[in-house]
Image: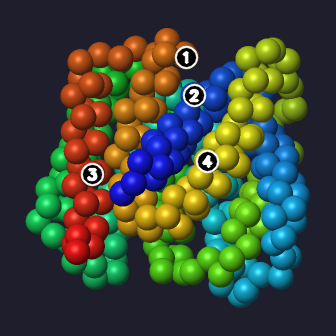
Amino acid sequence: MDFKALLMGLAFAFMWSSAFTSARMIVQDAPPLYALSFRFLISGLFAIVLARLMGESWRLTRGQWRATIIFGLCQNAAYLGLNFIAMQWVEASAAAIIASTLPLMVAAAGFLFLGDRLKPVAVAGLVAGFGGVILIMGARFGGGLDPLGVLLCVIAAMALTVATLALRGASSGGNVMMVVGLQMLVGAAALIGPALAFETLTVTWTPRLILAFLYTTLIPGVAATWVWFKLVQRIGAIRGATFHFLNPFFGVAIAAALLGETLNLTDVIGVAIIMAGILAVQLSKAPPAR
């Protein structure tokens, strides 16, 4: 792995993890589903314009349309929608910790339902990773962590796990930015119905809301996606996914720095255990060096 790939991986992990803090800011001043649907609309149109400027086509393969619809519904609508709702009641760091277990959930689900074989190091990583989550959440439940919010975050991560396994091995076939933009429009369309049905469009316009919304739309929404695909092109999806082990650290650190969320010794120990577990699972998938 060269130095440029290392910087790209660090940038992706930081941008992905920061989205929980900016989302927490947004839902304090605006209804979550309206805000997220509007965010996807802007991000999607922006990505499509970029795609056209990059010479990409509207014509997608059948596999690309399948990926667009599945990820638009499972990732953008279900995963992010449920997380935005949950962060009305749970801290950004708690949501980030649960979401960061995605590599663990994918590995566990692949073993349980698809017959994937796990190396001993991967099994140890799963035990350690989920053990770290239980350690942190157990302490936080004692401090008043909202059970409904946690449940929504868990269901959100499960939805993204299903999408990841459903599309495993699918090739992009080009038109990456176009697919990203269309996925966002699918998410926007899927969320506006529930927003109209269950939310009241009441917005408290603050500088925090405006800056957080712009940041979430352009940085985690578009820039992080672009960096991820460039990273995958450079070092491959398996090695690229190894950087997910940094997500619990960045997620908790950013929330503590910008939102003043409490960070105690149990959190530090739990995050370190989760990071080690994710790293073990991802490294067990890496092909041997030649």
Marks 3 and 2, Cα distance to the nearest angstrom? 23 Å
Label placed on residue 21 = 2
- Determine contact: label 1, label 2, CB under 8 Å: yes
Marks 2 and 4, Cα distance to the nearest angstrom? 15 Å
| Residue underneath mark 3 | 279
Q: Look at the numbered disc 3 and give the secondary structure of its residue.
A: helix
Outermost residue toward the front?
Answer: 3
Under mark 3, the amino acid is Leu
Q: In this view of the protein, which residue sits in the foreground, 37 or 253?
A: 253
Q: Quadrant of the N terminus?
A: bottom left
Marks 1 and 3, Cα distance to the nearest angstrom? 26 Å
Marks 1 and 2, Cα distance to the nearest angstrom? 8 Å
Q: Earlier in the sequence, mark 4 or mark 1?
A: 4
| Residue underneath mark 1 | 258
Q: Is residue 2 left or right of residue 289?
A: right
Q: Which-is-in-front pick, marks 2 and 4?
A: 4
Q: In this view of the protein, which residue sits in the foreground, 110 or 225?
A: 225
Under mark 1, the amino acid is Leu
Q: Residues within 10 Å of mark 2 (few under 14, many from 20)?
A: many
